[in-house]
Amino acid sequence: MLSSLSHVFSRAWSGNTVSMSSALLPKPQMRRLLARRMKFHLFGAFFVSLGCAALYKFGVADPRKRAYAEFYKNYDPMKDFEAMRAAGVFESAPPK
């Protein structure tokens, strides 16, 4: 067994190793490589941006609209004005 291992190692280091055949490796695609990759990445970017837009709409914009609608449903601007007037915020409308 030791002699068979020494035979394998001596063959590997002697420079007589078996090289890979060029038929085993596929040829690299040199033509239209950029166009093919751009098409893939453009479709990917489009769908990712659609997903982000949907997440923003349903996660941020719609809850914000509901919050503003709820606030202005019971908002009385004259009551708010009188409170600011009493606090002395306005120079042209002195407190009563």
Image (cartoon, grey):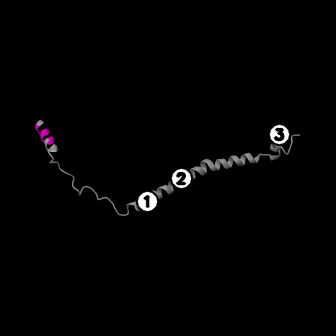
Q: Which residue is mark 3?
A: 88
* Residue occupying the point 82% across, 39% down: 88
Q: Give how far across and how far down residue 4 sits, in percent.
A: 12, 39
Q: Indicate the position of residue 18 as horizontal and vertical percent values.
A: 17, 50
In three-dimensional space, the C-alpha distance between marks 1 and 2, rounded to whole angstroms, equals 20 Å
Numbered badge on residue 38: 1
Q: Quadrant of residue 2?
A: top left
Q: Nearer the viewer, residue 22 or 50?
A: 22
Q: Marks 1 and 2: which is nearer the front?
A: 1
Label 2 Cα crowd, 10 Å radius (few <14 / some 14-19 / many 20+):
few
Q: Is residue 38 left or right of residue 12?
A: right
Residue extending farthest to the bottom is 31
> N-terminal of the two: label 2 or label 3?
2
- The answer to which of 62 and 78 lies nearer the viewer is 78
Q: Residue at x 86, y 42 (%)?
A: 94
Is residue 36 found left or right of 18 in the rendered image? right
Which residue in the structure is indicated by mark 2? 51
| Identity, as a three-letter code, of the amino acid under mark 2 | Gly
- Residue 38 located within the stretch drawn in magenta: no
Please state, as top left, top right, bottom left or bottom right, where the C terminus lies in the image: top right
> What whole-number distance in Å separates the C-alpha atoms at marks 2 and 3?
49 Å
Do the CB atoms of the residues marked 1 and 2 lie less than 8 Å apart? no
Q: Amino acid at mark 3?
A: Gly
Q: Residue at x 59, y 50 (%)?
A: 56
